[in-house]
Image (cartoon, helix red, strand yellow):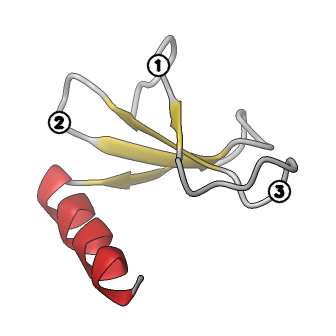
Amino acid sequence: MELNGARWRKSSRSSGNGGNCVEVVVNLADVVGVRDSKDPTGPTLAFAPTAWRAFVNQLARRA
């Protein structure tokens, strides 16, 4: 998955103290990328947009 130059967004639920930070990007190939903001060159998880929406919806129901 090519995400060089992508504009990553930090989760609004991430803590401001440098921990528990998640960043998300949607690239032009309809892939949602997720990474740990403390390790931007580390591994990235990739999801289909429909799978990502289902995941986020499940989290919202539990909040």
Query: Which element type, helix, strand or loop, lies under badge 2?
Result: loop
Which residue in the rendered view is the most extreme toward the top? Answer: 5
**Quadrant housing residue 19:** bottom right
Give the distance between the C-alpha atoms of the residues marked 1 and 3, in whole angstroms.
Answer: 20 Å
The residue where tag 3 is placed is: 19
The residue where tag 1 is placed is: 7
Query: Which element type, helix, strand or loop, lies under badge 3?
Result: loop
Could you say where residue 8 lies in the image, as x and y percent from the top left? 50, 28
- Dot 3 or dot 2: first in sequence order is 3
Tell me what residue is drawn at x 29 percent, y 27 percent: 27
Q: Relative to residue 36, is residue 26 drawn left or right?
A: left
Q: Is residue 40 above or below residue 4?
A: below
Q: Which mark is residue 30?
A: 2
Disc 1 crowd, CA 10 A, few/some/many (<14, 14-19, 20+):
few
Q: Relative to residue 40, is residue 33 drawn left or right?
A: left
Q: Amino acid at mark 2?
A: Asp
